[in-house]
Amino acid sequence: MSFIMLLLSILLLLLLITKFKLNTFVSLVITAFVLAILLGMSPDKIPSAVLGNEGMGNILGSNAVIFIFGGMIGRLVADAGGSYRIAKTLIDWFGLKRLQWAVLLASFIIGISMIFGVGMVLLIPIVFAVAIEAGVPLLYLGVSMTAALSSAQGFLPPQPAPTAVASQLGANVGMMLIFGLFVSIITAVVAGPVFTKLAQKYAPGAFKFTDHIEAVGEVKEYDLDEAPSFFLSVLTSVFPLIFMIIATVYKLVLTGGKAPAHPDMTYKIIDFLANPAVAMTISLVFAIFAMGIFQGKTMKTVGTSLNEGMAAVSGILLIVGGGGALRGVLVTSGLSKQIADLFSSHGSMSPIMIVIFAWAVASLLRIAVGSATVAGITAVGVVNGILANNPGNEMLLVFVALAIGAGSLIASHVNDAGFWIFKEFFDLTVKQTFQIWTVLECVISITGLAVILALTAIFA
C-alpha cells in the first residue's frame, strides 16, 4: 500500500503541474503533505518532515548560498560582457570550419556558473549572430550549445541539482566535480557535434537557415574594447571549481581522500576553502571586483546585476526546496527504507546495480514530473535507503549522484519548460522539438549512464 500511495502522490504532482498549471514549488509542498497523510504519519511529525531539518530546511539551509551566489557570478560575467568575450574569442580561434566545437566549449565554460534557462537566454543571441555571419542554420550550432549547457546542469557542482543531490547523499563534492567534468565533457561531445550529424539526416527540415527568429529578438553586442579579457572572464566563471579541485587532489595525494586523525593547519585551511559555500563566497567577492569595479562599474550597477542574478536563481532554489520536502517525507516515513528492504530481500545489490537503479528512478520521475531538479532531489529519497544498506563505499555515493543526474535529464517532453524554451528559440514545430530536443536529452542521459557504469566498475 505504501508504494501505491507513492504512485498516487506522484500522479497528483503531475496533475497539479501539467493539468492545473499550479506553481511547481507549491505543487511539491502540497504533494509532500498529502503523501505524509496517505502514509499514515503521525500529525506531529509531518511539519518537521516536510518543512524542517528532515525536509526543506535541510536542503535549503546547506545550499542556498551556493545557488544564489552562483547565479550572481554568472550574471556579473554576462553583464560585464565576459560571456560575450568568451564566445567570440573561441569562435575566432576555432574558425568557421570548427564553429560547433567553439560553441560547445564556450557554452560549457559559461554553463558551469549559469543555470540552464539563463544560459540559453544569454547564449542564443550570440550564437544566432555567429550563425548568420557563417551562413549556417542556428540549430547546427544550437545543438552543441544546448548539449553543453544541459550536461553542465546535470553533472557539475555548483549547479543547483548536482550540488543538492551530492549534499543529500553525503557524496564528496570535489570528487563529484572531477568525475562530473569527465562525464559531462563526453556527453556534451556525443550529444553535440556527433548527434548533430545524425539529426541532420533524420530531421533535415529542422535545420533551416533564417536571419530572423521572433523569440531571439535583437542581438545584443558588447564592445570588446571595453569588455574584460578572455582570461579574466574564464577565470571568474570557473573560480569556484579551482578551490574544490585543488583541495580534492591535495587530500587524495596526502591522505588518500580520508580526513587524518590529527589534521595540521594546512589541511584545515584547504578543507575550509574547499567547502562549496566558502568557495562560492570567495568567488563572488572576486567576481564583484573582476567583473565590476575593475571594469569601471559603479556599485549601484554591480548591485543591479547581483539582484538580477538572485532573481534568476530564486525560482530554482524554491523548487529544490520543494523537492527536499518530498524527500523528507520519503525518509521520515520509512518508505525509503521499505524500498531498500524490498531490493535487499533479493540479495545484496552490487555497485553497478545500485547505479542503474538510481538512474532508473530519476528517469521515471523526470518523465513523469518534467523538472530535472525535482526528479533528482526526489530520487535521492528513494535511493538513500539502499545506500544505507551498503555503507563504507564513498566512491559509490559519487557515482550514484552522477547517475541520478544522468537519469534526471532523460526524455524531456511537453511537461518540461526546457522543451518549450528549445522549441521557441529555434523556431521548431512540436514534432521537430521531439526529434531534436527530446532525443538530445536521451543521448546525454544514456551516454552519461554508460560512462558512469564504466567508472563504477573501475573505482567502486
Image: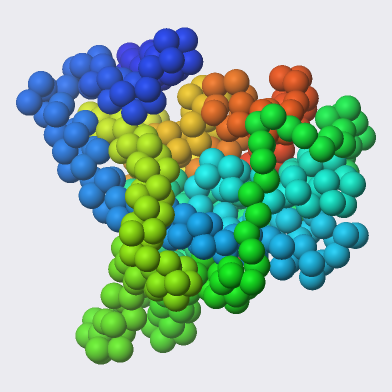
Q: Furthest-left residue in view?
A: 44
Residue at 33%, 75% in the rendered image: 273
* Picture residue at 84% right of the left edge, 51% below the top: 133
Is 183 on the left-hand or right-hand side of 135?
left
Residue 17 position, x and y percent, is: 43, 18
The image shows residue 23, relative to residue 373, as above or below, that is above
Q: What's the residue at 45%, 72% (across, down)?
A: 296
Relative horizontal placement of residue 45, taking residue 260 as reference (left or right): left
Residue 451 rendering spot, x and y as whole percentages: 66, 54
The residue depicted at 77 percent of the width and 34 percent of the height is 212
Q: Position of residue 423 (x, y in %)?
A: 68, 28
Is residue 107 positioned above or below 232 on the image? Answer: above
Whether residue 449 is visible here, answered yes or no, is: no
When the figure is inspected, residue 95 is found, relative to residue 349, above or below; the finding is below
Is residue 272 visible in this depiction of the protein?
yes
How many numbered circles are shown?
Answer: 0
